[in-house]
Amino acid sequence: MDRRTFLKTAGAGVAGAACISTVADARPNLEPAPEAVGMLYDSTLCVGCKACVTACKEVNDMTPVDRGDGHIYDSALDLSGDTLNVIKVYSDGTAAVKDSEENGFAFEKRSCMHCVDPGCVSVCPVTAMRRDPLTGIVTHHPDACIGCRTCMVGCPYNVPQFEYDNAFGRIHKCQMCNQEGLERINKGGMTACAEVCPTGATLFGPRSMLMEEAKRRMELKSGDNYNFPRGDISKPESYHEKELEADYQNHIWGEKEAGGTNVLHISAIPFDKLGMPPLEDRSYASVSEGVQHTLYKYMALPAAAMAGLTYVVKRNKDNHDGEE
Amino acid sequence: MQGDFDALEKRLGISRRDFLKYCTGIAATLGLSTSEAIAMAEAVAKPKKRPVVIWLHGQECTGPTETMLRSEHPTLERLILEMVSLEYHQTLDAGAGHQVEHLKELSMKENAGKYLLVVEGSIPTRDGGVYCKIAGKTMLAHTVEAAENAAAIIAFGSCASWGGVQSSGPNPTGAVGAQAVLPGKTVVNIPGCPPNPYNFLATVMHFLTFGTLPELDSQNRPKFAYGRLIHENCERRPHFDAGRFAKEFGDEGHKKGYCLYKLGCKGPETYSNCPAVEFNDVGGGTWPVGVGHPCFGCTEQGVGFTKPLFSLAEVQTHTPPNAFPSIAQREDTPGMSAGAAAVAGAAVGAAVGAAAVVSTRLGKSDSDSET
C-alpha cells in the first residue's frame, strides 16, 4: 500500500466513524420498567452485622468462602461464584468515626445494582441475561448461557461472576431472589437481605418509592431524628427512630448513573471512596447498541465490505494475469 | 499457713476448702492466677486489722446494697462481720440517729487514711445540694468530708458513678456522680443498675490483697469487669451474626432465643461482664439478655437512662471473627499468577527467538548449498 492509498483509507475510516457516532445517538437510555422493584442501601444505617450476607447464602444455597486461614466464618473478599452479596468496608487513618471520610470508616454493600439499562443484557449474544419487562429485575438463565463471559466485561460494577474452580462452572449474580424456583418477589415477598436487615440499611420496594425515600433523606441534617422503615417500604414490618450522626452526600447512586439502577445507594462519604466506578449518565448499552445496530442496518456494512473485498480480489487476480 | 486457715475455719465458720474455693472464684473473676488466689486467702486469713469501710447513701433506690445482700460468696454477714469492718452504713446499721453519726466521725478520725469509702447514690449539687440531707448535712458535704482521708473511694452503682437515672434530663436536683464532686481523687466506678456484687467484691478483694486498685478504663471502671462489650461475650451473639432476630416480644424468634438487637438491646454499645458473671448465683443464663429482655445499657453513661429503651444500639466495635474486606479487595480467582505468567511469557519468547534463529539458519544453509 502506498502512502496515498493509506491516507485515503484512513480518511474514509474516520469519516465513517464520525458518521456512526452521530447515528449512534439514535437510541436513548432505557426507562425504568413500569413496575420496577429495587433496594435502597443506606450506608449510614449499616452496622456491619452481615446478616444480609448470611441470609443471601442460605436462600441461594451457596457455600461459605473458606480462606483456609483459620476463620470459621464465611470470609468472602468480594463477589464470586459463591458470593452474590458482600459487605465491604472503607477505612481511613484511625478509622475511629463511623461515616467520616477522614479517620473514619463506612460500610458498603456489593451486589448486583440491577441497572435500568443493563450492560450485561445488552452484550449477551444468546439472551441468557434478561431484564424482566415488568419488574426490571435482571436475571440469568443458565439453560441459554454459552459461557462466553461477555457479561462480566459488560458490567461496570464487576457483578456477574464465573465459577472458575468448577469444570461445569456457570455465571452467578444476584437475581433479587426472583430466579426460577425461588421467585420471592413474584410471590409478593421481598429479598432475603432486606428481610433480615435489622436497621433497614437494606430496604426493599418499588423503585419509585425508594427514590422518594432517598430524596427525603437527602433533606435531613445531622442531629435530625428520622423514623427509618425496615423490610419492604410499601408495607414496612417496623420502624426505628434514629438521630442522624453524619450528613448525607447529596447524591443518590443509581438515580442517573449509566441510565440509572434499581438498587440505589446513599452514603455519608463520596461514592468514589466506596469503590463505585466513574460513570456518565449515558448507558454503555445505548451507545454500543447504537453503533452495532447502525453498522448492520439494511445489511449495509456487510454489503459494502463484500463489495470492497470483491474489488480487491479481482484487482489482484488481474495483476497476476498481467504478470504472466 | 495451715494454722492460719484453722483459725480462720473457727472464725468464719467456713471450711478451709470452701474458703479457698471462694478465693479462687474471686481471683478468677479478676482474671488472676491460682497463686494470687492463695495470696488473697492469706490476706483474709491473717488480717492486720479488718479494713474499715464507711458507706454513704445519696439519692438512690438502695439497689447496690440490695444486690450486696444477695451475694452468696461470701454472704453479706461474713463479709461485714468477718472480712471488713463496716462502721457506717445507713441500711445495715443497728443503731440510728446521732449515735451512728457520732460513731462515723470517730471512726473516720481514728482510721484516717486507712478506710475504704463506698459511695452509693448520686449527689445533688443544685442549690448547695439541699435536696439530699443526712443528719442535717448535705450529701455533698458528707461525701467531700469522707473522701478527704479515705484510702480508696469506690462509687457503687450507676447513680454514684455518673448520676444514674436522677441525672437524666431534666435533672432538677443537679444530680452528679461521686467523681464529679471529688476532683483530683481517684474514684473507682462500679456502675450498673443494679451493679453486679462480684465486681464490687473483686475490687475490694484486690485492694485488700495488693493494697492497690485494679487496672481502670478511661471511665475509671475496673477493666476486668468492664473491659469488653456485652455483645462480645453474649450467648445470643451467633444469632446476631447469622441474622436471626426476635422482632417482637413473644414472637417465634423471641421464643427460640434469637438476638434481641432489633428490640433495642444495647449490648453492642455497653461495656460489662454480665454475660460472663450473670446474676444471683443461680446460673442458667440469669441476666437480662439471658432471660429474654434486651440490655438497656445501665453500665454505660449516655446509654442507660438516656437512650430510649427500644431504640437501636450503635454497634461499637467489630471483633474477630467478624472481619470486612476493604473496598478494593478482590476475590483471587484460581487463574494464572503473575509469576506463572512471567515464566510462560519467557518460554514463549524463547520459542519465538529459537524459531527465528532456526529460520535464518535454514535460509543460510539453502543459499550455501546453492552456491
Image (cartoon, rainbow, N blue to C red):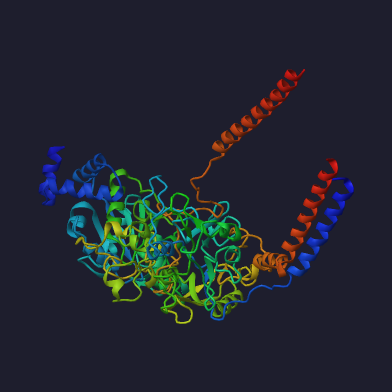
Question: B121 or B271: nearer the eye?
Answer: B271
The answer to whether A216 is drawn above or below residue B335 in the figure is below
Q: Position of residue B9 (x, y in %)?
A: 11, 47
Question: B299 or A68: nearer the eye?
Answer: A68
Examine the rendering and report whether any part of residue B118 can be seen. Answer: yes
Q: Quadrant of the C terminus of chain B?
A: top right
Question: B147 or B276: nearer the eye?
Answer: B276
Q: Position of residue B130 (x, y in %)?
A: 42, 74
Q: Position of residue A48 (x, y in %)?
A: 46, 61
Residue at image location 60% in from the left, 60% down from the top: A154
Residue A60 in which image quadrant = bottom left
Counting every numbered tag in the picture gives 0
The answer to whether A145 is drawn above or below residue B262 in the figure is above
Residue B231 in which image quadrant = bottom left
Left-right relation of A58 to B169? left
Residue A8 in which image quadrant = bottom right
Residue at image location 52% in from the left, 59% down from the top: A160
Left-right relation of B101 to A107? left
Examine the rendering and report whether any part of residue B124 can be seen. Answer: no
The residue positioned farthest toward the right in the image shown: A4
Q: Position of residue B263 (x, y in %)?
A: 37, 72
